[in-house]
Image (spheres, grey):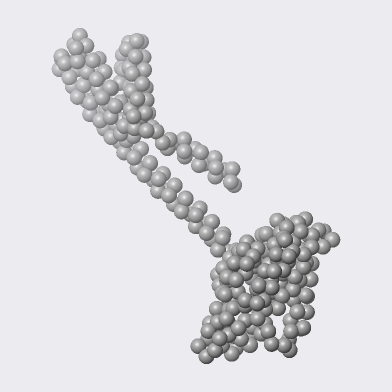
């Protein structure tokens, strides 16, 4: 599919070659002069049949730049061909009429083909603009589909797409859960709950980077850092635990505490990432059980 689309784009590019105006004038001049040389050299009895082909080609390729130049050259040769003694100005009645008819035909052909070219170019620009916009919209949509709209970090779809990129790497994996989040929602409302989730997303993104942070579930978050500095990773987790969000609910300041489980291992067929996530999740619940009856 991509090969076909690229082929079509190349064909459109060939039709709509971006040539500077001066180059269009010069190319038209060269083409028409060559055709005039041919019809003169070989004494073509009806030269306009040949020259009109050049007019159409130049008008179709270069628009009015080519059409006007080709018209001037063709009309000049028409005057030369039909005039007495090739003096450009003396005509008998029959040839004068031929010149008039030829001139009308040349002008009509030039305007018709040039207008088609202008409209085609306009349509091509519009299609190209729409195609570029659609491509940009697709990129934004693709990115948006992988970013959680509330926390502004990656979602489960992004994790599935990123999964293979972690193969065979040493990974620091952490599961993070907001303690008592359901009770927090019930007591203070979903607006406060959403603010806690938003603040958590910002904090994780600041500490570990958006590319390494995932909203794994409702109030569960996953961190995956490839090739980590283990001490630095642990320091950041400690900072996270000590700087949990404080949200002003109007009644009081709501403090969101975290339970955290983590490990640092090498991903392999024997110990795949999904097992590492599961083990980090188990450790997170151990941390939650240890602190269940304590104030944090």
Examine the rendering and report whether any part of residue 87 can be seen: yes
- Name the side, left or right, on which 114 lies relative to 131: left
Observer-nearest residue: 135 or 162?
162
Above or below: residue 276 compared with residue 101? below
Observer-nearest residue: 72 or 165?
165
- Name the side, left or right, on which 140 lies relative to 166: left
Observer-nearest residue: 276 or 294?
294
Q: Quadrant of residue 48?
A: top left
> Outermost residue toward the top?
85
Above or below: residue 21 compared with residue 205? above
Q: How many marks?
A: 0
Q: Name the residue rendered at 69%, 71% in the picture.
A: 237
Above or below: residue 210 compared with residue 182? above
Q: Name the residue rendered at 78%, 75% in the picture.
A: 282
Pick the quarter of the image with the C terminus.
bottom right
> Outermost residue toward the right?
270
Percent position (x, y) of residue 150? 56, 72
- Name the side, left or right, on which 288 lies relative to 61: right
Q: Name the residue rendered at 21%, 21% in the picture.
A: 99
Percent position (x, y) of residue 180? 66, 85
Examine the rendering and report whether any part of residue 53 can be seen: no
Q: Quadrant of residue 235?
A: bottom right
Q: Name the residue rendered at 43%, 35% in the picture.
A: 17
Percent position (x, y) of residue 250? 50, 88
Percent position (x, y) of residue 146? 60, 63
């Amino acid at each position: 599919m991509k090969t076909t689309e690229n082929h079509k784009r190349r064909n459109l590019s060939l039709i709509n070659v971006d040539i500077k105006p001066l180059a269009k004038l010069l190319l038209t001049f060269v083409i028409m002069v060559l055709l005039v040389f041919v019809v003169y050299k070989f004494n073509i009895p009806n030269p306009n049949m040949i020259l009109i082909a050049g007019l159409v080609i130049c008008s179709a390729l270069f628009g009015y730049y080519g059409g006007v130049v080709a018209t001037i050259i063709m009309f000049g040769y028409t005057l030369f061909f039909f005039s007495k003694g090739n003096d450009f100005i003396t005509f008998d009645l029959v040839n004068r009429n031929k010149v008039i008819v030829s001139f009308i035909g040349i002008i009509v052909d030039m305007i018709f083909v040039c207008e088609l070219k202008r409209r085609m170019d306009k349509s091509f620009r519009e299609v190209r603009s729409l195609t570029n916009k659609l491509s940009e919209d697709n990129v934004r949509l693709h990115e948006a589909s992988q970013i959680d709209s509330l926390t502004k970090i990656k979602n489960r779809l992004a994790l599935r797409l990123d999964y293979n990129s972690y193969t065979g790497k040493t990974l620091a994996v952490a599961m993070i859960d907001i303690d008592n989040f359901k009770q927090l929602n019930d007591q203070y409302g979903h607006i406060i709950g959403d603010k806690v989730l938003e603040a958590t997303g910002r904090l994780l993104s600041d500490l570990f980077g958006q590319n390494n942070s995932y909203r794994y579930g409702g109030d569960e978050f996953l961190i995956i850092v490839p090739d980590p500095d283990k001490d630095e990773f642990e320091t950041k987790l400690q900072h996270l635990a000590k700087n949990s969000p404080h949200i002003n609910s109007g009644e009081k300041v709501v403090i969101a505490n975290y339970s955290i489980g983590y490990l640092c291992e090498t991903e392999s067929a024997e110990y795949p990432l999904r097992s590492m996530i599961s083990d980090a999740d188990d450790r997170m619940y151990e941390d939650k059980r240890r602190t269940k009856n304590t104030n944090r």
